[in-house]
Image (tube, helix red, strand yellow):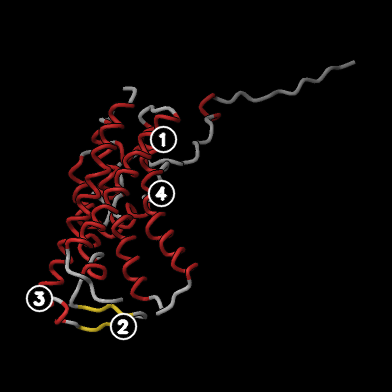
Amino acid sequence: MACYTASVPYIEPEEYQPEPPLRTQVTGPLAWEDPSLPFWRRLFSTLGATFAPLRSIHAVAAGEVGPALRFALLTSLPFMLVWAIVPFTHTLLFKPSFGLEVLPERSSVPVWLDLTRAVGIGLAFSLLSFVSWILPFASLVGAFANGTRPESPKVAAWRTALYRNWVIPLGMALFSLLVWALPADPSPVLVEITVLSLQMLPRILILIHCHTMARYFGANGFGALVVSVIPLAVQWAVSLSLQEGAAKLLPQMPPG
């Protein structure tokens, strides 16, 4: 009986190259640090990367502080300047549903100076709040890092804070705006949703970034939890203390 053997053509090994893995992480620099991209794409791509902590972890960890600082000045600073106008202005009465009334008799300073004071309070509070969590975060990341990564953990911590902190003052500014937009008798559920979405969720997002960066530098599960929770707990306590202190020190605010 004849035996037939199928001949299989020989193929060079190079033709069996596996498919490249799915791109789940940014391996190059952040869009903000890529000079080949147009400005608006650099800006909005980096803003969007805030909502993808795992995808952008390598790009955030590697680099200098300078570009991150310039990004923070462009994105965080404007919201730091405006969020305190509604709660700390005394010559303007922000009525429900975007009502506004000028009450110069409520304060001994003119309207423009009262607005300047409110802006200064917001900026000072925001900077103190920022420092209250970035200093312990940078220290803890450096303490829990296991030395397996080539990047500096403290530099990476500062880059994380400068690139991602904009969500907190943005949430504060939107919260003040929505408080002004609410009707005279808002639903308690609506108030709770507003507080949760604009006060708590930005801080939770920052906590996720802190946890991701801690794990990137080798912190174990409990250590990464310590690195992420303690700085944000300090920041929350400092923010509440500053606002309570301002309410006691400043002149009594108008009703509403």
Q: Residues within 10 Å of mark 2 (few under 14, many from 20)?
A: few
Q: Tell me the tag on residue 108.
A: 3
Residue 144 position, x and y percent, is 33, 27
Which residue was labeled with disc 2?
A: 99
State the residue at coordinates (21%, 55%): 125
Q: Residue tagged by mark 4?
A: 204
| The furthest residue to the top | 1
List the residue tagged with mark 1: 225
How crowded pointer 3 is (Cα within 10 Å; few <14, some 14-19, many 20+) is rated as: few
Question: Mark 2 or mark 3: which is in front?
Answer: 3
- Local crowd size for mark 4, using a 10 Å CA cut-off: few (<14), some (14–19), many (≥20): some
Left or right? Give the position of 233 relative to 119: right
In this rendered view, identify the residue nearer to me: 188 or 100.
Answer: 188
Sequence order check, earlier mark of 4 and 3 = 3
C-alpha gap between disc 2 and disc 3: 23 Å
Q: Does 148 appear above or below 91?
A: above
Residue type at the position of mark 3 = Ser
Q: Could you tell me the amino acid type at mark 2?
A: Gly
Depth check, front residue: 16 or 251: 251
Q: Nearer the viewer, mark 4 or mark 3?
A: 3
Q: Residue at x 40, y 49 (%)?
A: 205
What residue sits 48% from the left and 72% below the top?
187
The vertical placement of 177 against 142, above or below, is below
Label 2 element class: strand
Amino acid residing under circle 1: Leu
